[in-house]
Image (spheres, helix red, strand yellow):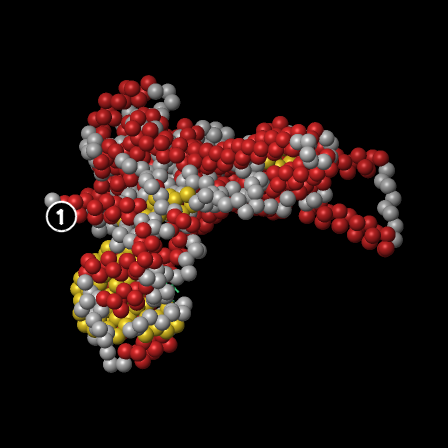
Amino acid sequence: MAIQKKHGKGRLDKFYYLAKEKGYRARAAFKLIQLNKKYSFLQNSRCLIDLCAAPGSWLQVAAETMPVNSLIVGVDLAPIKPIPRTITFQDDITTDRCRATIRGHLKTWKADTVVHDGAPNVGTAWVQDSFSQNDLVLSSMKLATEFLVPGGTFVTKVFRSRDSSKLEWIFKQLFTKVEQTKPPSSRNVSAETFYVCRGYKAPKHLDPKFLDPKYAFAEVADAAPNNEAKVFNPEQKKRKRDGYAEGDYTQFHDAPASEFIQTSDPIAMLGSLNKLSFEQEHGGNGDLALAALEKMPETTREVRDCCADLKVLGRKEFKLLLRWRLKVREKFGFSAKAKKAAAEAEAQAQAQEDEEVASVASMDEEMQLQEDLQKMRERNNKATKKDRRKENEKKQKEIVRMQMHMTTPMEIGMEQEGPNSESAMFQLRAADKAGALRQIARGKMHSILPAEAEKQEEEQNEEDSEDEAEDELERDLDGMYQRYQERREDRDTKLRAKKARREHKDEDGEFAGFSDQEGQSSEDEVAPDEDSDSDSEDEDDTAGGSLLTDLDTSAQPKGGLTRRAATFFDQDIFKGIDGLEDAEDDEEEAEMQRDSGVDVADDSAVIPTKPNKTEQDSNDKVSGESVEGETSDEEDQDTGALDSEDEGKSFEVVKAKPSPWEDAEAEVPLRNGRPDIDIITAEAMTLAHSLATGQKTKHDLADDTFNKYSLRDVDGLPEWFLDDEGKHSRPHRPISAAAASAIKEKLRALNARPIKKVREAKARKQLRAVNRLEKMRKKSALLADSEDVSEKDKAAQISRIMARAKKGGGKKGQRQEVKVVVARGGNRGRKGRPGGVKGKYKMVDARLKKDARAEKRLKKAGKR
Ligand SMILES: C[S@@+](CC[C@H](N)C(=O)[O-])C[C@H]1O[C@@H](n2cnc3c(N)ncnc32)[C@H](O)[C@@H]1O
């Protein structure tokens, strides 16, 4: 494409010379001539207003073309030299004063034509230019609406931009015929175009907002995105192009471990760094804290390993590092506790000195020995009591859970050491002898062996203070871990996505089997947490009334099944399933052979039976919803039995995750009224594909959710364990090659770009530096070889060259070439620098060329 130069002699095209020849003040005259040739509006006009008329070439054309005695008024910010048969004045067309002046000149007349060729003081950014140009067009339009006669013509220049279509819409509301054209004299490189609006409708009332740029150019909200369409054409996510921090061009960050010890915000460091290093800078021994840290016994191998890669820390490692920090801080005397202890010791010493307390005479040796022995005994007692208390607490909890029917079949094998075992403290026989059997049956666990309970309480009080400190540390660590996770989520898109999946329970989240959230909810809904143990005991006297019955029943094999199997099939989920009894009989033999009873894998083979009504009812019950009225009579009996007698003699089923389709409205977040789903895993993509192609149905998906993972009891399990479990213990979903490659592509595009850009930028910089150096070397060599220059001058010149090279090279005042870039393809609508363009650039409208060609084509066709 031949590029027209817009500066220097390049500007002087044929219209320039023509204008000179004909005596027009500007080549712009030909634009009006050509527009009028096409639309013939000047010949029929008796009154014309030229807005932005300087230097006045349009006025000249109007004066030539319009009938004699026509009224022609021109206004511009710049002064206009007088033109025969025209009235001109200097003013800003956006002001009321200008409007009043025009009114004064027109008196009772109305204008047949209003022309506007205004251009604001261009030269700033393109977007600003086009906006102020459009603003000026609106101002001229406002004047036109005031002075135009009904049926009148308005001609205006518009720069093609985002807002030009909005202007066109406005024109179309006010005129019967609106045409856009670009006269041949208008330069191709210019984005200007002309609108010729004919047949002014002259509405009686015009809302001022109509011509107010604030409203006229207001952004319309984007249409709702079609997320479904993304399934097979995953869109490339827009990245935040904030760029790198100044001087920081890597994604790897490390800091000395001593800094981590000293910092007041360890979480921030763990969240943002990749490594805590123990190496001294430049191999020296400058950082004494670091050297000390390395030699400390607290700095174990595990700690070092954790510090080596902070990005892979789990909850356990995270805690380990924070504990290590606390210990080291204490040793270094940084911790508040250590400081407090030091201050207390000092104060005590001071007080002792002040009060001059007589020192206690030393005891004789035997007394000393006795005392030591006593202390040792006490310590031992304390330790054994603590262990016993913990053991008791654990057992107590286990029993409460059983009373509440919280245990799942998976725990059946774990009860050897539980309440039924020989060694169990709460053995029923022993309890019966003590006459507390009925109390146990009523669930009053705390009233059994009151003396022992009291004793325990005393012990507990003693150790409470110790535990409190430990608990506090634990709570702090939990809080810190939480914040650490949040920070990681902030930085890590993958983690964020994972969390979002978990929260929204979209299709991928559904695969997770169980998540910590789920665990949480099940805990909330079903199991009392550790703190609420006592509450549940107090609250429900009768709830666990069947403890004795429960255990007795479970002790006897039912229907030939082992106790564990019988307990398992006692669950609500199996109630009302026809033929299960037979199946049980059939399986009896095999069941008997299994020495370990029901194993998880075998359970899953039974569980995926389609969820029937009873199962759903029990699920509803678990989630706290009332099922009354929804069940049939028969089922009412079942559930009634559950409610009244023992709220289910068997184990309750933890509700499987509802599929996103079950309660899509509640679970799937909406954006502009549509589900906001972004597929980011190959599994989800495969699933979406199989759904879209009909290979899978909604019901298949619902079935899939009932698996061995969905019925896990996560009650009481620590969060870090669930975190870890959630990563590995989940169903494996099939992945199709196409889906995997689509996701891979998406991720590759996301990952590769910034690194590529950095590399390119570095390479460019390097190349420039090498070129500069080479240039400098050549120049210096030439200078050194020349004989007419004195040594002093040579030295001065060489140092000048070097100084210039240091600055960045290039002669002062050397003009950079402006590259003309056509706004097409990727460059269309781009606000910033177009890709692959260095130095100065100028964007030009791609459509101009097309328009010109189309016009030529039409002309040719017309000739034929
Ligand atoms: C391209 S020139 C007009 C050329 C004119 N049509 C001719 O034929 O000679 C654009 C003019 O718009 C004027 N202009 C820009 N903003 C204006 C404003 N707010 N009020 C009046 N004139 C303005 C500038 O002073 C400049 O003279």
Q: Is residue 500 visible?
A: no
Q: Give the side of residue 206 with respect to residue 652, left or right.
A: left
Q: Residue at x 27, y 29 (%)?
A: 606
Of 493 and 712, nearer the camera is 493
Q: Residue furthest left?
A: 864
| Coordinates of residue 843 in the picture (x, y in percent) | 38, 47
| Coordinates of residue 517 in the picture (x, y in percent) | 41, 42
Secondary structure beneath label 1: helix
Give the image quarter of residue 601. Answer: top left
Kind of residue at badge 1: Gly
Q: Quadrant where the N terminus lies?
A: top left
Of 518 and 125, nearer the camera is 125
Q: Number of numbered discs present?
A: 1
Q: Residue furthest front?
A: 21
Of 821 and 649, nearer the camera is 821
| Coordinates of residue 448 in the picture (x, y in percent) | 49, 43
Mark 1 = which residue? 862
Q: Quadrant where the C terminus lies?
A: top left
Q: Give the side of residue 816 with respect to residue 629, left or right.
A: right
Q: Residue at x 42, y 50 (%)?
A: 8
Q: Quadrant of ligand 1?
A: bottom left
Q: Give the side of residue 772 with respect to residue 568, left or right.
A: right
